């Protein structure tokens, strides 16, 4: 079971609807048109249309799987004082004295440029369940990071 924010669930639903209602019918039409052009064994347009169809079907099935195995998280049910899904966490790397701020999200919402890390990432997993003031140790390829949690907020 995966947990998603309402926003991400709606984004995935919208993408799925667009693929089913708009993209797939066009792909099917393109495939029929390419198929009508003659011998399929020597028809690059047909092979390309089949490739696009397979890619579209794969994406549709992937998104359907996410939605079938996901639950929208209710922020009101989450603890406000501990790091959990949808928490914004500010922490300091004690070895470099660098402060960072991230939102903890599901793997399907991860976006480092937007400041969102997965709860399944090494840092996300180490921070989960901790309170402000606690120190989390994180095993990373370069060694062990010691992170002091400065603040935890839930918007």
Image: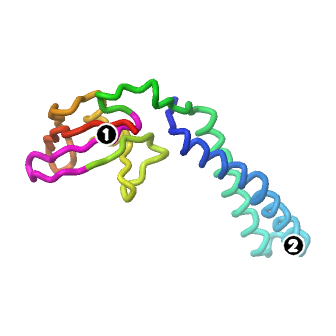
Q: Is residue 73 left or right of residue 39?
A: left
Q: Which mark is residue 39?
A: 2
Q: Position of residue 18 (x, y in %)?
A: 72, 54
State the residue at coordinates (29%, 28%).
81
Can residue 4 be seen here? The reply is yes
Q: Is residue 99 left or right of residue 45?
A: left
Q: Secondary structure at mark 2?
A: loop
Which coloring applies here? rainbow
Residue 123 x %, y %: 27, 42
Residue that appears at 10% across and 51% down: 97
User: Which of the 4 quarters of the picture holds residue 61?
Assistant: top right
| Majority SS type along the magenta span | strand
Residue 135: image location, x then y, percent: 15, 34
The picture places residue 82, in percent across and down from the top left corner, at: 29, 28
**Mark whose residue sits in front, 1 or 2:** 1
Q: CA distance from mark 1 to mark 2?
A: 54 Å
Magenta stretch bounds: 85-100
Q: Residue at x 87, y 72 (%)?
A: 39
Can residue 62 be seen here? The reply is no
Q: Does the stretch in magenta take in 155?
A: no
In this rendered view, identify the residue nearer to me: 86 or 12: 86
Q: Is residue 48 left or right of residue 6?
A: right
Q: Is residue 70 above or below residue 143?
A: above
Count of numbered circles in the view: 2
Quadrant where the C terminus is found in the figure: top left
Q: Can you tell which quarter of the image residue 48 is in?
A: bottom right
Above or below, 23 relative to 20? below
Question: Which residue is denoted by mark 1 in the rendering?
Answer: 124
Which is more N-terminal, label 2 or label 1? 2
């Amino acid at each position: 079971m995966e947990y998603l924010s309402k926003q991400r669930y709606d984004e995935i639903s919208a993408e799925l609807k667009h693929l089913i209602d708009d993209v797939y019918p066009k792909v099917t039409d393109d495939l029929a048109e390419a198929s009508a052009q003659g011998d399929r064994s020597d028809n690059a347009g047909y092979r390309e249309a089949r490739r696009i169809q397979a890619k579209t079907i794969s994406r549709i099935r992937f998104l359907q799987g996410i939605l079938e195995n996901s639950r929208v998280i209710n922020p009101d049910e989450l603890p406000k004082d501990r790091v959990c899904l949808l928490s914004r966490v500010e922490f300091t790397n004690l070895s470099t004295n660098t402060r960072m701020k991230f939102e903890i999200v599901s793997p399907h919402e991860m976006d480092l440029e937007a400041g969102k890390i997965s709860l399944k990432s090494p840092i996300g997993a180490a921070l989960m369940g901790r309170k402000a003031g606690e120190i989390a140790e994180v095993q990373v390829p370069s060694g062990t990071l010691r992170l002091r949690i400065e603040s935890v907020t839930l918007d």
